[in-house]
Image: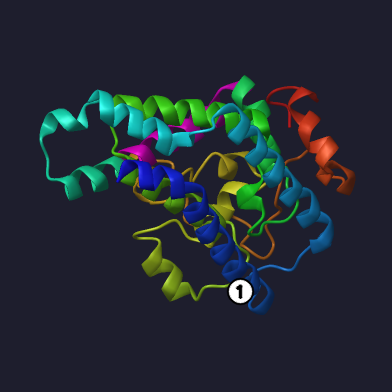
Amino acid sequence: MDELLLSNEPAIRLGFFLSLFAIFAIAEALVPRRARTIARWYRWANNLFLVVLNTIVLRLLFPAAAVGLAVYVESQAWGMLPLLGLPPLVTILLSVLLLDLAIYGQHVAFHKVPLLWRLHRMHHADLDFDVTTGLRFHPGEIILSMIIKFAAIAVLGAPPVAVLLFEIVLASTAMFNHSNFRLGLKVDALLRLLIVTPDMHRVHHSVVRSETDSNFGFNVPWWDRLFGTYRAQPAAGHEAMQIGLPTFRSESDLRIDRMLVQPFAGTARGD
């Protein structure tokens, strides 16, 4: 079973990615939440090239990826969860939830630690907010995030199926909550009780620092509410709020070459 899961992991993830990307892209075009400020073709070409680059880097450095590590961890009986003797379904759900908590903690750290913020701020330097923003991360951050994820999998002893499920959910919700499509206010209010919605996460991409340092969750909103980092709405409203950072605001900063050198530009917190 594990060998079958491992051999089919890339195809499974790619299928979910392409299907959901198409759905969210079409939804953005039909019912946009905000008017675009930058031509779609220009931003998308650079953001999607970055996705390809990150995919190649990860496959070269970590050929077996997170699911491969989970298979090895399971074979060695590592981690805390196997010691609890819980039913398989409970172990899977608990693994996904605790991995999500780990990603929340990582996200907070990437905002609070100046060196990590240098890597992460490229994600925030996008001047528009849409489905491709959810895929726009510096290769250095992608590598470090994978190492952190590996550590969490080893400590928890998360089973391979849980890791694959988490990877799919994380990629899916990242595209969903960065999407620029309009949800009705009542629908948004209901959904954000269970998952992070685009309106909730958009606050996190505000140019206002106090709003940037809020709503860190990717999958579920509960960690932000529990740890006091939840902010319901941006002060300026969603249509008027400014996306991005105080610096890196020219269209040329959206080019792939400029994005890759952003961690080395300026000061760590002076953006």
Residue holding disc 1:
27
Look at the magenta stretch and give its main secondary structure. helix
**Which x, y percent locates residue 185?**
48, 73
Regarding mark 1 in the picture, which secondary structure is present there? helix
Residue 33 appears in which quarter of the rendering?
A: bottom right
Q: Is residue 107 visible?
A: yes
* Direction from residue 221 to residue 171 in the image, left or right: right
Q: Is residue 233 visible?
A: no
Q: Mark 1: few, some, or many residues within 10 Å (few <14, many ≥20)?
A: some
Three-letter residue code for mark 1: Ala
- Where residue 149 sits, quadrant-wise, is top left
Q: Residue at x 45, y 68 (%)?
A: 188
Residue at 67% from the left image edge and 55% from the top image edge: 132
- Identified at 84% across, 36% down, the residue is 258
Residue 193 on image: x %, y %: 34, 60
- Here the colouring is rainbow
